Image (tube, rainbow, N blue to C red):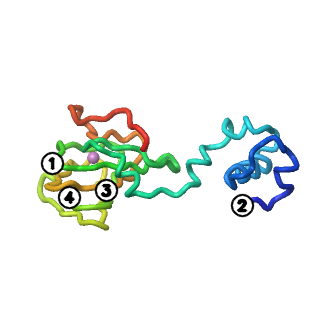
Amino acid sequence: MIVGIGDKPDSAEPQRNHDSSITQAAWVIQTHFFPAVSGSARISAHLPDIQFLMHKVNLAEKFSKIAEYWKPYIAAELNGQCIKLDKLKGEFVFHHHEHEDEMFLVVKGRFRMEFRDRHEWVEEGEFIVVSRGVEHRSVADEECWILLFEPASTLNTGNVVNERTVAQLERV
Ligand code: NI
């Protein structure tokens, strides 16, 4: 329970549902950091999606909802960066990202990160960071689950636009 600063919300606004500690945490943050605003409707308007941020995420459960390969989904956002989940099988297209570095963490399986002059196998529990400007493509002989950490704006195919390009990412 995060509540502990000031009065409990129950006495202040008894009409709200306070079963959730997250609701109470949001109330505390709002009261102490946004004292000028009040009312439950303002919480969602002035705070990040606190209910989303403050629940744990189970990767296996998230991946079970992903059916397509090469279609990254957003699982979380923080500090302008995204945690994206993607299932790989087959080979991607060579591309680079002009301004962003990309991190690929293997959750399940393995894949090969190919560069123009070499390649690197990335095994389960390992990650690789591809620097901006470097051409790369992912190749997975078998299904591979990866977690990407990169800016929300990073396009999966970088400087290339083809049938694999997913411009608008969905949440999972
Ligand atoms: Ni890339």
List x then y, in percent, for residue 29: 73, 51
Q: Residue at x 82, y 39 (%)?
A: 36
Label 3 vs 4, first from the N-terminus: 3
**Where, quadrant-wise, is the C terminus in this rendering?**
top left
The residues tagged by marks 3 and 1 sit, at their Cα atoms, a distance apart of 16 Å
Residue position for label 4: 111
Give the structural element (helix, strand or loop) at label 1.
Answer: strand
Do tag 3 and tag 4 residues touch (Cβ < 8 Å)? Answer: yes
Rendered image quadrant of residue 129: bottom left
Mark 4 → mark 2, Cα distance in angstroms: 41 Å
Mark 4 CB near ligand 1 (8 Å cut): no
Determine crowd level at label 3: few under 14, some 14-19, many 20+ residues with C-alpha closer than 10 A. many
Q: CA distance from mark 1 to mark 4?
A: 9 Å
Mark 1 C-beta closer than 8 Å to ligand 1: no
> Of the residues tagged 4 and 2, which is closer to the observer?
2
Q: Amino acid at mark 1?
A: Gly
Which quadrant of the structure image shows residue 60? bottom left
First along the sequence among labels 1 and 4? 1
Question: Which mark, residue 2?
Answer: 2
Give the amino acid at mark 2.
Ile
Earlier along the polypeptide chain: callout 2 or callout 1?
Answer: 2
Q: Position of residue 105 (x, y in %)?
A: 32, 60
Q: Position of residue 126 (x, y in %)?
A: 30, 66
Q: Secondary structure at mark 3?
A: strand
Report helix, strand or loop for mark 4.
strand
To which residue does mark 1 refer? 90
- Residue 9, position as x, y percentages in the image: 82, 50
